[in-house]
Image: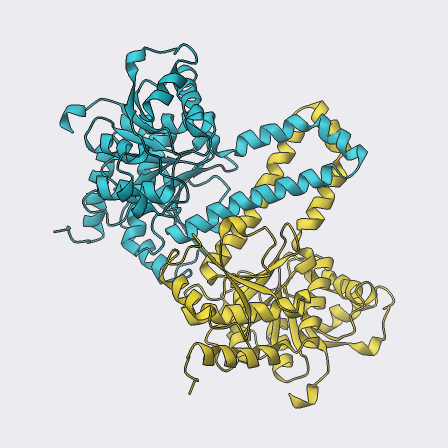
Chain colours: A cyan, B yellow
């Protein structure tokens, strides 16, 4: 991929999302016109459909920056990942990853089947040397600025070395996606005193303390500190991270619907709610994941971003923005270097 | 303890909470007068202080139902559990547990140092035969009725057998505290398809499927289903449960303060907020933990309930109510039987 240095082309799996390719094209317009992304794009999907959708209105950017790559198949949300990848070689997802592998693109963005994207991405792009298991990261709002949570589901059975790698991966993602210079990294646990938590956490904490030259490890944090905003990267295994992420989304919905129910209970409350409606709208925007919709699979030899299956055009545009930032920041090169350093510091043997 | 059959006396550690013994006495009044608890009470703490506090107003119940047990020391919230238990033999917490051990009380309620209560409770009351590790359970609100979450921190490094025991313990707690006949028990995981999750979850799921004669196991659930209200008992290890519980509390606070900020942003919103203020109050009551404030340490040979350090009198009264329900339901006897059955079904060897 030496000839691709400095280039930024994003391969977009347009067929995978719940809202279909129309939303992707809207997202592309929004990304180029409103967010002023300077990347080129390869739209992967059914060529005739995409051609028609692109003609709906005049593009605000040089048309040579966008090309279509035909892919006749679609991997459904409920398909079994490995089986789908094998049977649907001409799916938009498999083809988008192939463009990344071939160096024609420097990042893939997809709203499709998470399992298939993770499996396909890992199989084709392979983990970076020294990384045993990739990690899925996401950006979460807090009382102050948003933070990176990693891993949120790629690796549900982690070793201490995996968690150390998550710290390096998450730190690099925070630099590239959030523009931070020296992100504060913390380890999610229960009870922050030395020796609390469990043996996995204690071993990880022991390792992380040796990494001062690589990451800015600030120590363990507890669940109650998660949304304080004093940490930029929160590290956990994929089992814990997935449960925290999904239960938080569920709680957000539950609280929202409870407030709504209570506000509609009588006329006085309804009038009050109507007067203050904009407050709830603004709150939703502040806490919405749309601004930070790309969840990258970190630790691979290529940038692969998963956007939520139900992503709207704003979420898609922001996923494209984050993808372009990862490319611009040479995140993968930086991860490659720091993982080597980290493995030396914690005495992980070089892979054969 | 054969002579205590049918009795219900609760030993109350009045000195441990953040709000002090005054709040405990208010809680006692509320429990007996409003909630009509029929237990007797032993108030454990500084005798002169408690005597004075009891005289503030006329008791609504027969004074013979309440006695004071003098304890001159207090274990602070930040003290190291084992050290505190050793050095403060005459603390209200140690003395309350001693009354339980002696059969003078059938339950202990404390708002004190969680670590000390768990350690002291486990050391003095010992786990029931067949239970390797006790579990801390709590009751969480949902879209429908509340559910039991166990373990929320007692055992951060669980085996599959420990999780199976959590299922039996949690099921019994749901019966006694929530009045359910056949609580639906689910295992918290990521991805509910067979083989997803991790090896601990898979082994536990395998075991739980054999327990149909003991508990009503309905299968695995994911984080996004947590607040749906379709489950009565959610099982997890103490590491995951503690993080889920504390991060949920943190998120609740974060969302609340974000709404408040937005509502105060301009005069129109402020007026709206004033008109609908009662909606937020009612929501807080619905989602507040005060109704279900007792978190029992399950699996011991005695009922020990931890109430939140900052419990107000309503929370304290409800913890007393739950404690009395555990006694009335003979929860410990039921657990003793079901743990034996469960261990036979999953082939756990009898302890020597």
Marker count (numbered): 0
Q: Position of residue A86 (x, y in %)?
A: 26, 44
Q: Residue at the spot x=72%, y=83% of the render?
A: B6
Q: Position of residue A181 (x, y in %)?
A: 33, 32
Query: Which image quadrant is residue A111 in?
Result: top left
Q: Nearer the viewer, residue B75 or B121?
A: B121
Q: Is residue A87 above or below residue A189?
A: above
Extreme left residue here?
Answer: A352
| Residue A247 in view | yes
Q: Is residue B220 above or below residue A277?
A: below
Q: Nearer the viewer, residue B86 or B193?
A: B193
Q: Nearer the viewer, residue A200 or B142?
A: B142
Of the 4 image quadrants, the one containing the N terminus of chain A is top left
Q: Residue at the spot x=48%, y=46% of the render?
A: A246
Q: Residue at the spot x=48%, y=80% of the render?
A: B130
Q: Is residue A240 above or below residue B233?
A: above
Q: Position of residue A99 (x, y in %)?
A: 23, 30
Q: Position of residue B151 (x, y in %)?
A: 51, 64
Q: Residue at the spot x=48%, y=54% of the render?
A: B243
Residue A253 as seen in the image, left or right of residue B34: left
| Residue A180 in view | no
Q: Is residue A207 above or below residue A25?
A: below
């Amino acid at each position: 991929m030496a000839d691709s240095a400095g280039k930024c082309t994003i391969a977009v799996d347009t067929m995978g999302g719940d809202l279909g390719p129309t939303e992707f094209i809207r997202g592309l317009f929004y990304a180029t016109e409103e967010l002023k992304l300077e990347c080129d794009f390869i739209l992967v999907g059914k060529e005739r459909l995409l051609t028609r959708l692109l003609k709906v209105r005049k593009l605000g950017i040089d048309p040579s920056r966008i090309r279509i790559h035909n892919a006749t198949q679609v991997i459904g949300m409920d398909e079994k990942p490995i089986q789908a990848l094998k049977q649907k070689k001409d799916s938009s997802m498999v083809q988008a990853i192939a463009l990344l592998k071939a160096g024609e693109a420097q990042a893939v963005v997809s709203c499709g089947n998470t399992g298939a994207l993770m499996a396909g991405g890992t199989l084709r792009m392979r983990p970076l040397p020294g990384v045993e298991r990739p990690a899925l990261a996401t950006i979460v709002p807090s009382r102050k600025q948003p933070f990176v949570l990693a891993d949120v589901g790629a690796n549900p059975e982690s070793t201490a070395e995996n968690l150390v790698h998550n710290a390096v991966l998450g730190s690099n993602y925070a630099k590239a996606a959030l523009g931070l210079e020296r992100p504060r990294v913390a380890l999610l646990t229960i009870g922050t005193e030395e020796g609390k938590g469990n043996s996995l956490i204690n071993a990880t904490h022991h390792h992380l303390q040796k990494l001062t030259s690589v990451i800015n490890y600030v120590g363990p944090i507890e669940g109650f500190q998660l949304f304080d905003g004093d940490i930029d990267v929160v590290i956990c295994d994929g089992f814990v991270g997935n449960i925290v992420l999904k239960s938080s989304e569920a709680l957000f919905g539950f609280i929202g619907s409870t407030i709504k129910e209570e506000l509609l209970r009588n006329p006085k409350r309804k009038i009050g709610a109507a007067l203050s409606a904009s407050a709830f709208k603004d709150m939703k925007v502040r806490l919405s994941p749309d601004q930070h919709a790309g969840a990258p699979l970190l630790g691979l030899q290529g940038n692969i971003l998963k956007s939520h299956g139900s992503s709207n055009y704003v979420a898609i545009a922001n996923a494209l923005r984050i993808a372009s930032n990862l490319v611009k920041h040479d995140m993968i090169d930086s991860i490659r270097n720091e993982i080597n350093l980290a493995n030396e510091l914690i005495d992980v043997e070089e892979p054969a």
